[in-house]
Amino acid sequence: MIIPASAIPSLQCLRAFLAVAQLGNFTHAAEALGLTQTAVSHQIAQLETHIGAPVFVRNRPNVQLTDLGKKLLPKVEVGLSGVWDAFKEAQNSDKTQPIVVSSSPEFCTQWLAPRLEKFFNLFPSISLNMILEYRRADLVSGEVDAAVWLGAGNKDLSATRLGVEEDFAVCSPELAQSLPKRNARSVAPLLQYVGARHTVLDWERWFQQIYGDQLVAKVAQPKIEYGPVFDTFPDMIAACKRSEGFALVRSSLVANELSTGQLKRCFIESVTSDLHYHIVTLPKAKCRSEVEQFRQWIVAEAASGQVVH
């Protein structure tokens, strides 16, 4: 529908009409619109000229609507309100609420990233900016809005544990089938990756937790062979799948590989980790709906125990 320019008065005239009708006074309407009284009077005069009849009865200092003005008012209110709502919706349609989340590289790549599509489907107005790092980002300064850490952080932060972690060794199904009953650890190298010590996935520490300091030397005979050090956790896991050695892992990081049979728990030894992943925010973050929605989602996702393939 194409509306001729002469068919309706200007938007300025209609806004002036609404303001005067609602406030009953030219001076008050001018103040509300940020105009002079003369400008408002001129716009009302233009409107009445366009219609061909008065819309106000001028009784100083106030004015009243004529019968025609009373009929016109609700239709103008509905029409301008609809236009306003439409433009507000259009302006907000592409706006997102960004949040910055810090996480260790292996937790993001192995656990969080496969689930993000689900999060974005549930919360399309929220955008995530992920920072992958081992250091603990400064939430107080606003550097990040939320973080996933091993441990809860200090007492000034709000932290929720995402589950109980176990530390154990894994290998490929093919390697698992060929393991002898004795000295199985000597069959293949112990794989490592650069960030292992940051996440306490350290072979020597694991042996000490299982056997104690005095027995480690006996258990380590024949001498344990350490394999190559990979740049990332996924690189190490890829080598493990190729039967290149054993990998020391945390349960949440290989849940998918275990459920699909790509990896096997190769030794009976397993320990409950000293540290567990937590979602950490500032207490006041509950006032920010986008941060609180992410926090609640990741807690619920962890509690569901579902594996994402």
Image (spheres, grey):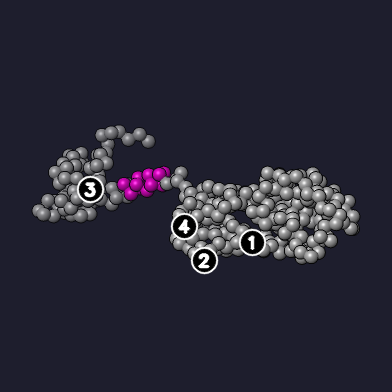
- The residue singled out by tag 1 in the image is 276
The kind of residue tagged 2 is Lys
Q: CA distance from mark 2 to mark 1?
A: 17 Å
Q: Amino acid at mark 3?
A: Leu
- In the drawing, does residue 280 fall left or right of residue 235? left
> Please, what secondary structure does the residue beneath circle 4 have?
loop
The foreground one among 139 and 95 is: 139
Say whether disc 1 or disc 4 marks the residue closer to the N-terminus. Answer: 4
| Sequence-first tag of 1 and 3 | 3
Q: Residue pushed farthest left?
A: 60
Q: CA distance from mark 4 to mark 3?
A: 42 Å
* Amino acid type of the residue tagged 1 in the rendering: His
**Does dot 3 land on a helix, a strand or a loop?**
helix
Q: What amino acid is found at the position of numbered circle 4 in the picture?
A: Val
Residue 88 shown in magenta: yes
Q: Secondary structure at mark 2?
A: loop
Q: Position of residue 121 (x, y in %)?
A: 57, 50
Q: Position of residue 4 (x, y in %)?
A: 30, 33
The residue that disc 2 covers is 155
Q: Quadrant of residue 201?
A: bottom right
Instruction: Residue at 67%, 53% (x, y): give it.
Output: 197
- Give the mark, 2 or 1, whose residue is nearer the N terminus: 2
Between disc 3 and disc 2, the foreground one is 2
The residue located at (22%, 54%) in the rendering is 22
From the top left corner, tell me how far across and down residue 139 is, in percent.
49, 56
Residues shaded magenta: 80-91
Between discs 3 and 2, the one toward the N terminus: 3
First in sequence, mark 2 or 4: give its number. Answer: 4
Cα separation between marks 2 and 4: 12 Å
- Residue ID for mark 3: 33
